[in-house]
């Protein structure tokens, strides 16, 4: 007996695609990422929007942030890219 979820019709393929997308999102939320620079760049955008990371960590040697204002501005920009609030 063939199970319905194994039958390759468009509905089941869409369900598999939805499942894979949801799993990728959930796995991404478990990750904390880092990127080089003191402002949002393409690498940061990909981490937040494409990989859906759950948070970002700043390193002085990597990000070069020298003031509270820079940290606040960068954090605000990153949060605006995220669909779920980031852990920073």
Image (cartoon, rainbow, N blue to C red):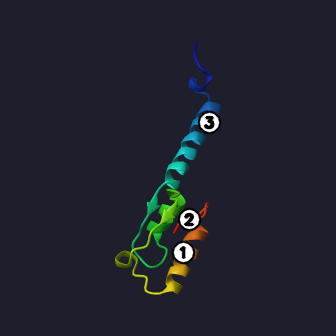
Q: Marks 3 and 2, Cα distance to the nearest angstrom?
A: 28 Å
Give the structural element (helix, strand or loop) at label 2: loop
Horizontal relation, residue 55 to residue 3: left or right: left
Q: Residues within 10 Å of mark 2 (few under 14, many from 20)?
A: some
Marks 2 & 1, CB-CB < 8 Å contact: yes
Q: Which residue is mark 2?
A: 86
Q: Residue furthest left?
A: 61
Query: In the image, which is nearer the foreground, mark 3 or mark 2?
Result: 2
Q: Residue furthest right?
A: 11
Which numbered mark, 3 or 1, is in the foreground of this view?
1
Label 3 to label 1: alpha-carbon separation = 35 Å
Point 58% across, 12% down: residue: 1
Q: Earlier in the sequence, mark 2 or mark 1?
A: 1
57 to 7, vertically: above or below: below
Q: Which of the 4 image quarters holds residue 72?
A: bottom right
Labelled pair 3, 2 in contact (Cβ < 8 Å): no
Judging depth in this view, the residue of 51 and 12 nearest the camera is 51
How many numbered marks are there? 3
Say which residue label 3 marks.
15
Q: Give the quadrant of residue 13.
A: top right
Instruction: Answer with left or right where residue 28 lies relative to residue 80.
Output: left
Q: Is residue 61 above or below residue 10?
A: below
Residue wearing tag 1? 75
């Amino acid at each position: 007996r063939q199970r319905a979820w194994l039958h390759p019709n468009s509905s089941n393929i869409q369900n598999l695609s939805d499942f894979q997308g949801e799993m990728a999102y959930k796995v991404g939320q478990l990750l904390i990422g880092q990127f080089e620079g003191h402002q949002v760049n393409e690498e940061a955008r990909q981490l937040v929007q494409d990989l859906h990371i759950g948070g970002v960590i700043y390193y002085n040697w990597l990000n070069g942030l020298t003031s509270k204002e820079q940290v606040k501005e960068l954090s605000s920009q990153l949060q605006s890219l995220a669909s779920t609030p980031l852990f920073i």
